[in-house]
Structure formats: C-alpha cells, structure tokens
Image (spheres, helix red, strand yellow):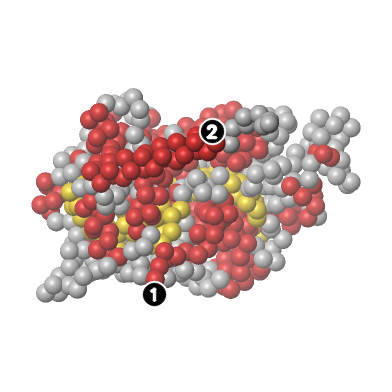
Amino acid sequence: MPGFEIDDLPVASEDERRSILTSYKIKVVNLTKYHESTTQMTAPKDVQENRKALKTACRVFPPPLTSFHSLRTVYSVGRSLAENIVEQGYTKPTEVQLASIPLLIRPKVSGKVTDDVVPHLLTVAPTGSGKTLAFLIPLIEKITRQHHNAHLAPDQRHVSALIVAPTKELVGQIVNEGRKLTRKTGVRITAMRKGMILQDVSASTRLDSDGGSDSDGSLEIQDRDPHSVVKSDILVTTPLLLVNAIANSQLPEGTLLSTITSLVLDEADVLLDPLFRDQTLALWNACTSPLLHVSFWSATIGSNIEELVLSILQKRESEVHLPTSTPLFRCVVGLKDSAVSTISHKLVYAATEPGKLLGLRQLLHPSPAVEGRRSTPPLRPPFLVFTQTIERAVALHSELLYDIPSEAGGSSRIAVLHSDLSDSKRSDVMTRFRKGQIWVLITTDLLSRGVDFRGINGVVNYDIPTTSAAYVHRVGRTGRAGREGGVAITFYTKEDIKYVKGIANVIAASEKGQKNGGVIDAGIQPWLLGALPDVSKKDKQKLKMRGVEVRRSIKGDEDERTIKAKRKAKISTKSGYERRLEKKRKGAMQGSQRRQRNLDTEDDEWVGIGD
C-alpha cells in the first residue's frame, strides 16, 4: 500500500503486534483492499465462501500504544499535550486508544516525523471505552504541528478540524474534554452556536483589521458582531446548526469549509442514518480540501454504513484526482455491535402499560428480597429512564413526581430532559444530574448516545428501544470505562413481544462475554430465546422509523380501534372511566366559567345616560 507501511514503524515485530492485538480482541482490517478483492470476484457465491479468508488477508497489525509515555518517545507528541493527558489522570490507554491512536499519528523515525499517509478510520468500540480521547489526541497533535510548520499568529488561524455529533449535549461534552487537553498547546476548540459566523479565508471576504469587509461589501460583515466570528482551530457542532450557518452565510458554495483538513463523525451510524444523512453529507461535501482526512466513531456501525462511506470516499478521490490513494481502515474492539459485558441485563415482562408503571415504582421502592431472591436486580440511584416519545417522558415525570419522600428531597430528585426544552433548561438539568442532585432522570433517546455519566448505576428502558443498536447505546450509559455493577432493565408488554428477539440476542451475546470472565448469572434463559418470535424485516423497519405504534400521539383521522388502543397505552395510574369522569368535570367547570363571564359582561354593558 503506497505511503503506509506498518513494518516501517519503530515498534515490535508483526508477530508481537498480532499477539498484543489479539489478546485485547482488536481487529484492524483494510476495508479498501477488502472491497477491491470482493469486486474482482464475479460470482456472489465466491464472496460468501471466501469472505472470512479475505478479511484475514486484509488484516493489519498497527503498533499498539501500550503506554501514553510512548506518545512523547515514539510519536513526538508535544510536551503540553502529553502533560495534559497525565494531569487528567489517564495512565494506561484503553483498547480503542491502544489500537487507533497509532493509526492517526505519524510517528518519529530517526528524530524526524515520517511522511506516511494516515488512513481514513472507521472505529467500532463499546460505549464508554474512551473513543473521544482516541480522536482528540491525534487531532490536537496534528493541529499543533500545523501551527509550528506554518508559523501562524493566533489571529491568522482558521478552523481546520470539524467534529460533528448528533446532540448538543454530546457537543458540549466533547468541547469540555477538548479544553482540558488543549491547555497551553495553542489549540482552540469551540462549540458551534446560533448566530456564529464562519469566516471565509479568501482574500476577497476576509475581515480587515478594523472589522470591515472587502471593497465590494458583498458579505456585509461590518454590520455583524465581530465576536460571533469563529476564531478557533476545532469546531464542534450538530449537523443542522452548521448547515444553517452555511446557508445563511451568503458566500459561494465550497468556500466556508475549504480549510477543513480533518472531519470527525462521532456516533457516525446515526449521523449517516436517513434522519441526519442529508445534513451530514452536505457538511462532508462542503469540506472541499484535497487533504481532507475523515474518521468515523461509534459503538454500532453496520455494513450498510461501511459501504456508504467507501463509496463516498472513492467518489471524492476520483473527482479530486489525488496522487496518492488514502485507504479506509476499520478497527473493531471486542465483539462488533455488542453491549458492554460489565453490567447485568434483565428483560421484564410487564404485560400492560400499568404493569410497567408498577414495575418502575417497585424499582423506586424495592421490597425486601424473599429467600434471597428478587424479581429484578436491585437498582440504586442515580439512574436513567428512557421512553419512546417526549410526550411519554413528560407524562411519566408527572406520574413519578411525588414518589420520592420529601425527607429525601422529594420532587427535586426526579427530572425530565428532552429536545423541546430550552438550551438553558437542558443545561441546568444536565448539571444537576452530574452533581447528584437529581436521582432519576427521565429522557428520550436524546441522551442515549455518547454522553458520559460516570456515576450512573442503572438504565431503565421503560419503552423498548427501536433497534438493537439503540439498546446498546442506551444501556451503555452505565458500566462506562470498565465500571462494574451497573444494571440495565427493559420492560416489555404484549405489544412488544414481536420486537424483543433482537434485544434478547444482544443481551445473550453480552452475557456470553460475562461468563467467559466469570461475572454474573444469566438474565436471558435459552428457553426465552427459543420462545420469542423472529422479527421480520418489515417489522424492524417499522419499529425503527415509528416506534411502537400504540405509544404514538393520537391523530384525528385514525379509526376508533387505534384511538382506543393508544388511550389504553397512555402512562397513567387512572382507569379510562376515571379519566372520562375527570374530563366531564373539567368540561363542566369550563362551561360554568364561560357562562359566568358572559353574565358579568351583560351586567357591565353601557345602557346610556340616566335622567
């Protein structure tokens, strides 16, 4: 492979590297080479029969980073960055850092940094395994070297790296971690906000010294707040925020992100899913630099995403006509698309919606174990509760608001978080939860990805996840960084039975890893896996797009049967009869108030001037 020879790196022999990577259950494959090999085969049957042999032939064994000390001695990482890593308490690289960082930083040979091509990287690693640090360290070092080589003053620098994440909470977390690592390095990292302006680097539109624009005045920057112009090296954003900023910039297409040489997609599978795909690809296509390097990170990346990434990279290379081809490597840590094996999983059949509410209340108020046994594992706060929709999250919060005694903090210990809240309220809830002031946080899939809560003791799937990948990410909020003792409980009703098989398979695979390590008793019995029905492709797609239908909002054009089922699935301890009575009482009160207002208006009516 031109420009990238693993054997040239100053490390142990290939056999030693192979042994270390295998012991950590790490597999690195050259996907570009693998794809080229499969396309040369004419018959699909040949691909199926030789798939395993092809992947073995395309395996790569990079030098493992067994110690952060090697960042200075082998990779010539800047002193400030190395000191920041130590100050943050990072002593030994995790599996994903051990494998991916050597692929993303060019090493030092004979005192000089090599000119090896850094491959595009697609990384699949468990939740809480340290992926953020794995992409931030190489990114900061790359920018530090660029500053050193270009001798640019701080006010002459521009955004050269873009990190895209699906939620504002994850953006904030990445920026916080980045600021800890960039201290005294000269590298600046910023979160994208509404109203920010991306400064064009072309001479025709660059800000002059007094804040004005060029002579044609097409950008009219002089009318804008100069403090809103992004003056940072690394910009972290959600897709929509940056797409809107580009659309509102009034600059020629392809100029605003032309300086981006590093693009990082965190939670890449959801960013390239149909929900975010158009926005993400718009940003990717706007990064027009021929030197662009792209990396993808998630705990779950399917083969469809891999194929999409390969096709886009190949298309870009053919359009740009680069002299050297940059390969795409895939790094998989552990079992691909699996849940963390350091927590206990439990599927609980609750039959009905009231049964789920009762089950959740039993978690809040656990009864003493009978003969040393419990129906569900003990769950200590703080913990997260996931629902299918915002409406259900709000309803569940209202139901549980007074379940914690006032002596223990009362309603202040339970909170709800969803995307309809303002940024300030979301930030306040996150802060209180991290401080331990909130014990039970009810949320949607807004918090299912990437957000790191180090003290979470458990996750409750009040409504089942819409995909197996969603389950992996939800339960990954506990058991982070190898922490043991976390609990993941998933309630399901008779409406959910046809969707449970995929989740049960993920749990069974996780428990297989636990047994190998001698951890806990199985929560999924073989008879249950055999009894659950297989999920059809149509049902999987329907669940992914819409969730369980009876838990969605009622629409006026729906038939009476559907409306009745949705009313029955509402989160409430009141029966349908009680709700109807309450509705009638409310209607009677409103009618009485309207009549009283009409009477008051008639009494106050002007009748003319008296005698």
Q: Mark 1 points at which residue?
A: 407
Does residue 74 appear to the left or right of 530 in the view shown? right
Image quadrant in which the C terminus is located: top right
In the rendered image, residue 204, in percent from the top left (x then y), is placed at 83, 34
Q: Mark 2 points at which residue?
A: 602
* Type of the residue with mark 2: Glu
The secondary element bearing badge 2 is classed as: helix
Q: Quadrant of residue 566?
A: top left
Residue 203, numbered label: none
Which of 69 and 169 lies nearest the eye of the viewer?
Answer: 169
Residue drawn at x 15%, y 45% is 532
Which of 81 and 163 lies nearest the eye of the viewer?
Answer: 163
Tag 1 near tag 2, CB within 8 Å: no
Please say whether residue 411 is visible from this viewpoint. Answer: yes
The secondary element bearing badge 1 is classed as: helix
Q: Give the label, 1 or 2, closer to the camera.
A: 2
Please say whether residue 118 is visible from this viewpoint. Answer: no
* Type of the residue with mark 1: Glu
Residue drawn at x 54%, y 33% is 602
Q: How many marks?
A: 2
| Other-residue count near label 2 (Cα within 10 Å), few / some / many at <14 / 14–19 / ≥20 | few
| Other-residue count near label 1 (Cα within 10 Å), few / some / many at <14 / 14–19 / ≥20 | few
Q: Quadrant of residue 79?
A: bottom right
Q: How far apart are marks 1 and 2 (CA)?
A: 52 Å
In the rendered image, residue 308, in percent from the top left (x then y), is placed at 44, 34
Residue drawn at x 31%, y 40% is 584
Label 1 vs 2, first from the N-terminus: 1
Does residue 411 appear to the left or right of 1 in the view shown? left
